[in-house]
């Protein structure tokens, strides 16, 4: 099980992979918006999205868990 964490503070602009989606290492799972820039958050491992910890529009701080990959 791998936790995917926010690399910086910002708003969750878009969820790219929903729960149950199979993802490959390096695929984007979400996109944050910070200072009018879009920052993709990639997975760090291949697997299935077990749980999303955020929703579109949520604010996250650096290090907050965005999703769990199993």
Image (cartoon, helix red, strand yellow):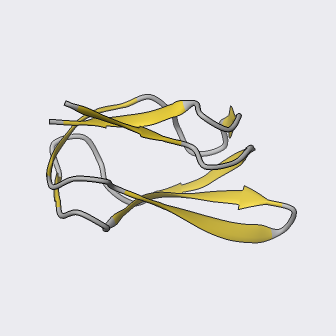
Say left or right for 39 vs 4: right
Determine which quarter of the picture holds residue 42.
bottom left
Q: Position of residue 27 (x, y in %)?
A: 31, 67
Q: Position of residue 28 (x, y in %)?
A: 39, 64
Position of residue 11 relative to residue 30, above or below, is: above
Residue occupying image coordinates x 17% and y 51%: 21
The C terminus sits in image quarter: top left
Say left or right for 1 vs 36: left
Q: Position of residue 68 (x, y in %)?
A: 30, 33
The N terminus sits in image quarter: top left
Say left or right for 36 vs 29: right
Residue occupying image coordinates x 67% and y 35%: 60
Determine which quarter of the picture holds residue 31.
bottom right
Count of all numbered marks drawn on residues in the image: 0
In the image, 62 versus 54, the foreground residue is: 62
Position of residue 30 relative to residue 51, above or below, is: below
Q: Position of residue 9 (x, y in %)?
A: 74, 43
Residue occupying image coordinates x 32% and y 55%: 17
In the image, 42 versus 52, the foreground residue is: 42
Residue furthest to the right in view is 35
Residue occupying image coordinates x 31% and y 67%: 26
């Amino acid at each position: 099980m791998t936790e995917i964490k926010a690399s910086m503070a910002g708003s969750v602009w878009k969820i790219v992979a929903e729960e149950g989606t199979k993802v490959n290492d390096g695929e984007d799972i979400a996109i944050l918006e910070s200072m009018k820039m879009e920052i993709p958050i990639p997975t760090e491992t291949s697997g299935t999205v077990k749980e999303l910890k955020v929703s579109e529009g949520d604010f996250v701080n650096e290090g907050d868990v965005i999703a769990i990959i199993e």
